[in-house]
Image (spheres, grey):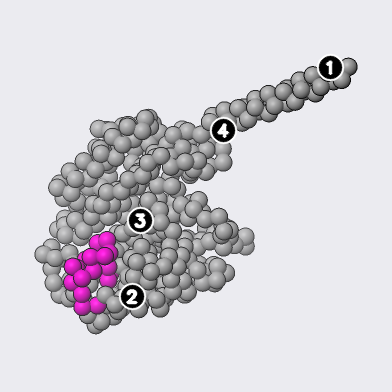
Amino acid sequence: AMGDRWLAIGAAVAAAAAAAAAAFVAVKIEQENECELRAALDIGSGSMKLVIARVNKVSRKIDRIIHSDYVELLLSHDLSQSVDGALSEAILNQGSAVIRHLLRECDNARVPRQKVRGVATQVFRAARNGQAFLRRMQEETGVNIQIITQREEADLGFACALANLKDVSERDLVVWDSGGGSFQLTSAAPSTMNEKKIYYNMPVGSTSVTVQLIEDIQHRSFKETQSGNPATREHVVGLRGRILDALAAPPDALVAAIARAGGMIVGIGSDTSIFSMAAIVTGKNEFTAEEVWAGVLTCLNKSDADLRRFPQPEMVLPKLVLLYTVMAHVSCRRVRYIATNGVCPGILVTPTYWSG
């Protein structure tokens, strides 16, 4: 009888284990069914970015990043030198080659073309032939790369930051995305407002302030040199004034949101972003406006070779001055830098890009 009892207990344990294993397999299958392979392209003013990832369609979270790539292409530099408001054929040919290269990486990862989404930002909003180029790329590759508004770009930047932060609530989050042709500051709106978000978007970016430094302050030709080095204190103080002249007053609601966040803004971008430059010069990923300005002073009267520890040394000073000026302008006490590959993570998890 005792032996029969132990046999019964053993059978019950085995059945429970089998049931648990079956449940685990069922959960894994369900998770697999909830996930799909997607690719996102961010065709920006200074670079083209790609992220391939498994994305959970239900939770709208990135399950796993498969591949990430970044190719520098200074489209906004090219447009700044245009006499007719169009991107040159030479830069568009380079852009076409880069997009095809990124799509080959999608093919290698077995991402179907219908699971690739792309956005284009400020330089394509400004260039008179930007839309025609993207339309041609869609006809030739089957991938739709849409020109998004600055507000849509801001929403993607906010989604990127939110996806990367576990210790900051959406209510307390203020996000800053700054590129070659524009910047976007975004926060969640308080419940008393009809809008869901507060935006402060300006068509001011690292290329435009570099052009200002070289042409308006140093009185040189941007066509002949794209480097603002060496720059003096007088140069950077003059540039700070020019940037301030170009900035509208930030919305009071945004300034209040920054105050609620303890004066902190989350800056997102790649290793050539203004925030990355500040992280390098200060030696940390969270920095104050005073620390950024101290970093500016260490870069004065230096050649490109002297500043080679920075990516894009020719643009270090304009980027740092832009960062400092906007921080002071919006009453930001400190910035926390989160490295992202453009707004690709935001594209991957934003439902509007994947409906239909």
How packed mark 1 is, by other alpha carbons closer than 10 Å (few <14, some 14-19, many 20 or more), is: few
- Decide: marks 3, 2 in contact (CB < 8 A)? no
Q: Which residue is mark 4?
A: 31
Q: Which residue is mark 2?
A: 295
For badge 2, the amino acid type reads Gly
Give me the residue at 34% from left, 35% from top: 106
Among the two numbered marks 2 and 1 on one chain, the one whose residue lies closer to the N terminus:
1
In the rendered image, residue 112, in percent from the top left (x then y), is placed at 37, 30
Which quadrant of the view contains residue 290? bottom left
Give me the residue at 24% from left, 77% from top: 300
Among the two numbered marks 3 and 2 on one chain, the one whose residue lies closer to the N terminus:
3
Q: Which residue is mark 3?
A: 270
Magenta stretch: includes residue 304: yes
Magenta stretch: includes residue 323: no
- Position of 284 with respect to 172 (left or right) is left
Give me the residue at 49% from left, 53% from top: 164
Q: Which residues are magenta?
A: 300-318
> Distance from label 2 to label 1 (Cα)?
79 Å
Looking at this view, is 288 or 234 the one in front? 288
